Image (cartoon, helix red, strand yellow):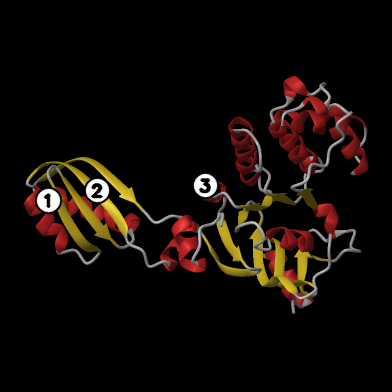
Amino acid sequence: MTSSQDVVTGSNTGDVLVAEALVRRFGDLTAVDGVSFRIERGETYGLLGPNGAGKTTTINMVAGLIAADEGTVTVAGERMNPSSVAPKRHIGLVPQDLAIYPELTARENLTLFGRLQGMTGPELRKRVDEVIELIGLTERAKDLTKEFSGGMKRRLNIGIGLLHQPTLLILDEPTVGVDPQSRNQILESVERLSVEGMAVLYTTHYMEEAERLCDRVGIIDSGKLQAEGTQDELIRLTEGADHIRLAGSGDTSAAADALRALSSVQQVVVDRHSLQLTVTDAPAAVAQIVTSATGAGMGLADVEITRPDLESVFLHLTGKALRD
């Protein structure tokens, strides 16, 4: 249980969201089982897992839409529950289901939701203009949203969540079913938000999105947070080796012998004009490897590093592919 002292400490250290030991049951089904994580200002935190893993239920508890059976949620230092008002002011929620009015234009939708947030006059008009530009709908701002593509509707949905400049933006699988162009625009918008200091909670079952956007990732499966950390931290959990390919000319045999003497190098395979290395922690080892190879007489034309990815981490932790 999080004490008031814990909440204050978390707030002082930059934590916008603190979720502690969240549990939610639906009858005999435990949809979320002891999930804990924190998000700092300017950080994008990804909840990565297949459909049915517990991502949306976790988000609904964080946003105060449903109560947790156990555990606590604190947003900007204020305790969250379904009856809370103050902490919800800090949140922008972008749900999977579209929350827009099809008979209104994009600008009218944003204006309506801005008024619901208490904005009026020049402040509202200025903010609507900023959001329309951010989501890439300037040329379609006066068109009815029922005429929009699925991707454009998704982008407008995100814009509505951004209007009141929340401290925490929650995006629940915002790219599901959108075209590649809209998907890329959505991802670019999320990247800008974290740079501007907004905390972002991002759920997805697309591995490449998590790798591109998220500073830290929590892998959730069967309602449990299996692991969390930066991509590098998670990859180290697999104990998987990295691979480095050195391409060039000169004395590759002597270079191979020199590299085998390094503690970070597990294996060296000579392949005509290249060396294939199996190593531990390639980013830390590559400088020494390049120095040793060139010092032994190999002229390098290319250095290529291949590392385990989040897909391999997910397989290692859950025994199945992400979208199973």
Q: Is residue 217 left or right of residue 256?
A: right
Q: Residue at x 22, y 55 (%)?
A: 277
Q: Earlier in the sequence, mark 1 or mark 2?
A: 2
- Please identify the quarter of the rendering in which residue 280 is found: bottom left
Q: Quadrant of the C terminus?
A: bottom right
Comparing 78 with 109, the one in front is 109
In the rendered structure, which amino acid carries the disc numbered 1? Gly
Q: Residue at x 79, y 52 (%)?
A: 91
In the rendered structure, which amino acid carries the disc numbered 3? Glu
Q: Which residue is mark 1?
A: 295
Q: Which residue is mark 2?
A: 245
Q: Which mark is residue 208?
A: 3
The mark closer to the camera, 1 or 2, is: 2
Mark 1 to mark 2 CA distance (whole Å): 17 Å
Q: Residues within 10 Å of mark 3 (few under 14, many from 20)?
A: few
The mark closer to the camera, 1 or 3, is: 3
Q: Earlier in the sequence, mark 3 or mark 2?
A: 3
Q: Is residue 267 left or right of residue 29?
A: left
Residues marked 1 and 2 touching at CB (< 8 Å): no
In the displayed structure, would residue 139 be above or below residue 285? above
For mark 1, give the secondary structure: helix
Residue 287, x across and y down, in percent:
26, 53
Q: Earlier in the sequence, mark 1 or mark 3?
A: 3
Residues marked 3 and 2 touching at CB (< 8 Å): no
